[in-house]
Image (cartoon, coloured by chain):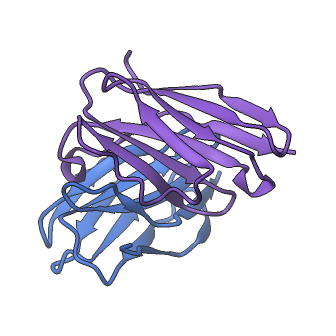
């Protein structure tokens, strides 16, 4: 597609339920990132996929968070046993290699509300 | 984690005024990027600067990268309501994900 697509755009879930957030990056972009943005906060790095390399998971806040990227394209971020503090906008971005030079293209995000 | 501090946090000005926002770090970056984010949307890349002392212009926006590649500024001339948004700076190193500042929220009123 022409841009980064994220689904769903909004998700309301009950505390303790699992959720899956999907990201479809720009075709040909080898790098894919997940960030979290809470109200009044900047973007918090979660995880980074680069080609076939092992992902950089250093930003995942707990073992309830996991992500995979299938076939070097679509990625799914899974949050198990959701908590209220997980409420945030989850942003996905993709880029060509050399991320420090080319910059990111972001999706519009998934707004997650845990009630 | 390489921290980026942005100032001011909030800025409210009238149309036609000039403004400067700042992005500072104690770390050296191979590049620094500026993004603008509007409500309900993801950030959109405005510019990438890679050379110390580099100045780039995008219409009424002027971006500067510090000589030591630790800081940057964004200057807007004759601000317009369409410039309203959250301005984010992000520092990068090859092979690593970008680190983002918390942003400057700009409101330009007619």
| Quadrant in the rendering for residue A10 | top right
Chain A on-screen colour: purple
A48 displayed left or right of A99: right
| Quadrant in the rendering for residue B70 | bottom left
Residue situated furthest bottom in the rendering? B26
Q: Position of residue B16 (x, y in %)?
A: 51, 58
Q: Residue at x 22, y 44 (%)?
A: A102
B43 displayed left or right of A9: left
Q: Position of residue B85 (x, y in %)?
A: 56, 51
Q: Position of residue B41 (x, y in %)?
A: 57, 38
Residue situated furthest front in the rendering? A63
Chain B on-screen colour: blue
Residue placed most toward the observer, B44 or B95: B95
B102 displayed left or right of B23: right
Viewer can see residue B22: yes
Quarter placement of the N terminus of chain A: top left
Q: Position of residue A63 (x, y in %)?
A: 58, 54
As displayed, is residue A97 above or below residue A41?
A: above
Quarter placement of the C terminus of chain A: top right
Viewer can see residue B38: no
């Amino acid at each position: 597609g022409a841009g980064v697509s994220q689904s769903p755009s909004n998700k309301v879930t009950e505390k303790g339920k699992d959720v899956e957030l999907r990201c479809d990056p720009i075709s040909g972009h080898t790098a894919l990132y997940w960030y979290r943005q809470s109200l009044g906060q900047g973007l918090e790095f979660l995880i980074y996929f680069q080609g076939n390399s092992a992902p950089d998971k250093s930003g995942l806040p707990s073992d309830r968070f996991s992500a995979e990227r299938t076939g070097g394209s679509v990625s799914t971020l899974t949050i198990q046993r959701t908590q209220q503090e997980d409420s945030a906008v989850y942003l996905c971005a993709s880029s060509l290699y050399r991320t420090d030079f080319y910059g990111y293209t972001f999706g519009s995000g998934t707004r997650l509300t845990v009630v | 984690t390489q921290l980026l501090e942005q100032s001011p946090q909030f800025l409210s000005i009238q149309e036609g005024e000039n403004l400067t926002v700042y992005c500072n770090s104690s770390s050296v970056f191979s590049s620094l990027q500026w993004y603008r984010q509007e409500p309900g949307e993801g950030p959109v890349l405005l510019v990438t600067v890679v050379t110390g002392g580099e100045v780039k212009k995008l219409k009424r926006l002027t971006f500067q990268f510090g000589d030591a590649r630790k800081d940057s500024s964004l200057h807007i001339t004759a601000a317009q309501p369409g410039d309203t948004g959250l301005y984010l700076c992000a520092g990068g190193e090859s092979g690593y994900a970008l680190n983002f500042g918390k942003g400057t929220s700009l409101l330009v009123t007619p």
